[in-house]
Image (cartoon, rainbow, N blue to C red):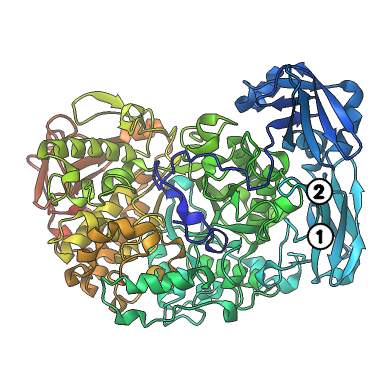
Amino acid sequence: MSSTTRRSRRRPAAVLALALGATALLVSPPPQPAAAAPSGQEQALAQWIDRDTVVWKGAEHAPALLEFGTHGAHLRLTPGSLSPSERLAYPHLTHYPAFTVDPRDRALARTALRDALHATQRTADGRRTTTGVQIPGVLDDLYGSRAQHASLGAVFSPDGRPTLSVWAPTARTVALELDGRTVPMRRDDTTGIWRVRGARDWAGKPYRYRVTVWAPSVGKAVTNEVTDPYSTALTADSARSLVTDLDDPKLAPSGWSRLAKPAAVPLRRARIQELHIRDFSVEDRTSRHPGQYLAFADPRSDGMRHLRSLARAGTSYVHLLPAFDSATVPEKRVDQARPGCDLPSYAPDSDRQQDCVTKTAARDAYNWGYDPLHYTVPEGSYASDPDGTARTVEFRRMVQGLNGAGLRPVMDVVYNHTAASGQDPHSVLDRIVPGYYQRLLDDGSVATSTCCSGTATEHTMMGKLVVDSVVTWAKEYKVDGFRFDLMGHQPKANILAVRKALDALTPAKDGVDGKSVILYGEGWNFGEAANDARFVQATQQNMAGTGVATFSDRARDAVRGGGPFDADPRVQGFASGLYTDPNSSPANGSPAEQRTRLLHYQDLLKVGLTGNLADYTFTDSTGHQVKGSGVDYNGAPAGYAAAPGDALAYADAHDNETLYDALAYKLPQRTAGADRSRMQVLALATAALSQGPALSQAGSDLLRSKSLDRNSFDSGDWFNALHWNCADGNGFGRGLPPAADNKDKWPYARPLLADPALRPECAAIHHTSAAYRDLLRIHATEPAFGLPTTAAVQKALSFPLSGRDETPGVLTMRLDNLVIVFNATPQRAQQTVQALAGEPYALHPLQAHGTDRTTATASYARSSGTFTVPARTVAVFRRG
């Protein structure tokens, strides 16, 4: 997404009903109002941050009590102040009254934390005030530092006996429900961990924890039957955890221990395809396992043939949208609803399709999966059998299939929120340690700025869960990378702890090279954590120089035009005709305004092509010498990267309209199909030919459409499925997109969807794909696209025609022995670089002999240093 989006797409339909998901991939949402505490739940304005200190918003600076139990037990509080280390750890609490726990009462803390807990105070006028107490800080102080290195979940000893462990420091009792019987567990008072050691025959048996604990959300003690947060296997629909040893040879597909991976590609050179597991194959008639993990083990399917062609061209990674256990989709096929309409029979601009799809959306087989239930178990709906360990074996076969195709898998992980909190049936963490794992606002309500119940990865044991989960996926499933959803809601320190833990994995000890695992995420800055309010966030600027990349929305907006949430979707950009091929929208402004904005977009693209480097110096379109950090992007610096690899380039992803759909809105409606194809390639080229990593949404090279749906997280197969066979179209004209997120755009969408000229023919689809692969080959074979430092980029890369006289709609980049001309205008362009006169340049062989015969007509006049490029074309020239 960009830096200004709302996060409706993540609202699990089964939990919140389609009230309207991705980070914004990709747009980062703006701050949202604080969520009100659930009806009947008291506020918790006091925060017990460590064994010595309580902070109480709104209290008087006078003696107070922490009361617990039913017989007047209490801890005395005296007015105090925060220490420097406390101020550093809790910057958002520094302006509230602080209290010191009386040293004589501190021994009562462990008992108090397992009971109803309130802060009380007599005010100066004699009134008694009371409030609930937030306890994560003191839990970390008393237990977290001792528990953070312990092994949790089911751990098998060499003799095959499992030990089951769960962290539940506030629980009064914990027992194990194992296969229909109850087994007591023993509490370790130093760590708050409850354990039980079992027999060898426990392996494979279903279990839950029976936890009796005080639940502030309902104001009473409850006994919850809860699955294991550290589950590695589940029964269908996540009803029970399974005692599972992932090292069991029976769970390893043939050849797993000898799996040969494609050569590791450094993050700065990564070219990534982003796809959804179900989208990939559900409508692929050549797949033997449509919609399943095993579709990636079908080497002769159309989908796998296409992925192999991309891999041969230079795509190195496949980014899988969430594949961990999620809360929304019924896992058994018999329980999955299907639209009860003849969808293909309706008109391409009808509202009947979306109405029919929406009626079954909460119960169908489709969701993006950004509603985590168990972080470290493969989602069951993609398995041939969701009941048991088939999902483990088949996920591993998927990894084998991708590796065999020359691709390394990346997992989209969502540790920033859970599907639910409190006593909701889809709440796991909060029903074991209420009020700990979720991030609470100052009044005790759960933060929901991510769209769902936010997690507090700044807390020791939630941060530990993140690290442990990622390491399990890397070690046990041989996943080669991780994309962190809404990473800016997590502490930078937590992401760096993940990096450190991965770096410690070695082939000799763990069977994988952890240092080769790539990390990137959405570094958007918004919500209750914004501007480092609670901790140093993992945001775009903060992550620079860490080796963990963040999505860059700068060039994306410049290429497409406007932003993802413009009221009028026709706002144009560099690759959609701004100024050079204007549409009729008044939102684009006057010709003079369009020209000015286009030239600024070209500056944003220049910064993007460098890898978004903060310190790269160049001449901007006004003729001034500027650094990347000096170019404005909506009030923020455009350049923020310290080195190539810090920023990830993209023109489209699963969030917002596909690139084809965005161009459908923005290009003049009269634009011919062949020209739409050329503009699609041009837009993709701005990311594909940049320094640093780049991502494209699967199918963008096939002109993929979602029928103008800007938020298809729950729009079903009808709007989302990939079409590998061009005879099936590209997805455009499958009806008006679902009303919840798109109805305000229907007046713009209806005439487009009804226009048969906007449904591309096979020739245009084939051309786009072939031209894109040519660009990938150029990137893969030219070392200059993998420069390692800012200094190297500064030396090798320049924009020789940038300045007051540069051509609107044309951008010329010199990169070592290459010259690349992006001509987004509808006319042939000539770009004369006088300094190159006499140099022996020629069109790159991969384009001169490529499938696009229009690009092949691009030419170079050596005598004058003039590069001539056809309309709507990106041409790469190489010095001979």
Is residue 313 depicted above or below 75 in this figure? Answer: below
Going by the numbered disc 2, the residue's amino acid type is Ala
Residue beneath the point at 48% across and 47% down: 267
| Element marked by disc 2 | loop
Count the marks.
2
Residue nearest the observer in this picture, 653 or 263: 653
Q: Position of residue 49 (x, y in %)?
A: 73, 30
Q: Residues within 10 Å of mark 2 (few under 14, many from 20)?
A: many
In the image: residue 154, left or right of residue 697 = right
User: Does the CB distance between marks 1 and 2 fall below 8 Å?
Assistant: yes
Residue beneath the point at 17% across and 35% down: 596
Is residue 229 depicted above or below 706 in this figure? Answer: above
Q: Quadrant of residue 864?
A: top left
Going by the numbered disc 1, the residue's amino acid type is Tyr
Residue nearest the observer in this picture, 257 or 18: 18
Q: Which residue is mark 2?
A: 168
Residue nearest the observer in this picture, 582 or 111: 111
Residue nearest the observer in this picture, 636 or 726: 636
Query: In the rendered image, is residue 501 in sight?
Result: yes
Q: Position of residue 309 (x, y in %)?
A: 38, 68
Q: Position of residue 711 (x, y in %)?
A: 40, 58
Report the disc number at residue 394: none
| Element marked by disc 1 | strand
Query: In the rendered image, is residue 718 in sight?
Result: no
Measure how far apart labels 1 and 2 are at the Cα level. 10 Å
Task: Please report whichever mark, 1 or 2, sits nearer to the chain's N-terminal start.
Answer: 2
Q: Which residue is mark 1?
A: 209
Q: Position of residue 695 (x, y in %)?
A: 40, 53
Q: Quadrant of residue 444?
A: top right
Q: Residues within 10 Å of mark 1 (few under 14, many from 20)?
A: many
